Amino acid sequence: MQGILYEEPNILLFAFVTLILGGWGAWMTGRACAITWRSATILVAYVLVLAMAVRFIHFALFEGTLLSLHYYLVDMVILQAIAFAGYRFYLTRQMVRQYYWLYEASGPFAWKPKAAA
């Protein structure tokens, strides 16, 4: 997988920077967009910038390639998936909590209308 998903000599460096640091930032970005009722298109724009920051961390700390489209896209896709999961998770919680008489959770990422009593 080295060379395809990550360029560092060790997968732990990739996991630490992209999955832990970047993933936490992406999850919190999704949370912030959901709590402030922003759309998913705004979330995409925020994560594009976050992926640039993650790419810079790879470059500054671990001598990775800064301007690599391939690794930027890999980081961006991973971070977009995590951010969208966080967005849907918190949007579901918010919809179920705020509109409890209308909706009920149908899983951690979706809600459904309550059955008429």
Image (cartoon, rainbow, N blue to C red):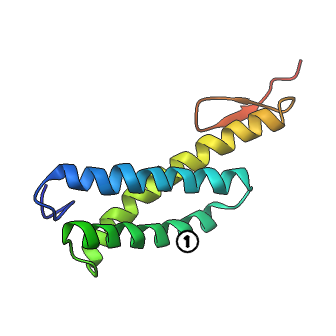
Q: Residue 26 location in percent, x, y?
A: 49, 55
Q: Amino acid at mark 1?
A: Ala
Q: Against 54, is 16 above or below?
A: above
Q: Against 44, is 91 above or below?
A: above
Q: Residue furthest bottom?
A: 67
* Nearer the observer, 104 or 11: 11
Q: Against 2, is 104 above or below?
A: above
* Nearer the observer, 26 or 74: 26
Q: Residue furthest top?
A: 117
Residue at x 20%, y 71% (from the top left corner): 64
* Nearer the observer, 57 or 69: 57
Label 1: which secondary element: helix
Q: Residue 19 location in percent, x, y?
A: 34, 51
Residue at x 45%, y 53% (from the top left corner): 81
Residue at x 68%, y 45% (from the top left corner): 91
Q: Residue under label 1, please give it.
A: 45
Q: Residue 2 location in percent, x, y?
A: 12, 58
Give the quarter of the image for residue 4.
bottom left
Q: Residue furthest front?
A: 61
Q: Against 29, is 105 above or below?
A: above
The quarter of the picture where the C terminus appears is top right
Residue at x 38%, y 61% (from the top left corner): 77
The quarter of the picture where the N terminus appears is bottom left
Give the quarter of the image for residue 69.
bottom left
* Nearer the observer, 88 or 36: 36
Left or right: 29 as drawn, with respect to 37: left
Q: Residue 76 location in percent, x, y?
A: 39, 65
Crowding at label 1, few (<14), some or many (≥20) Cα neighbours within 10 Å? Answer: few
Left or right: 77 as drawn, with respect to 61: right
Q: How many marks?
A: 1
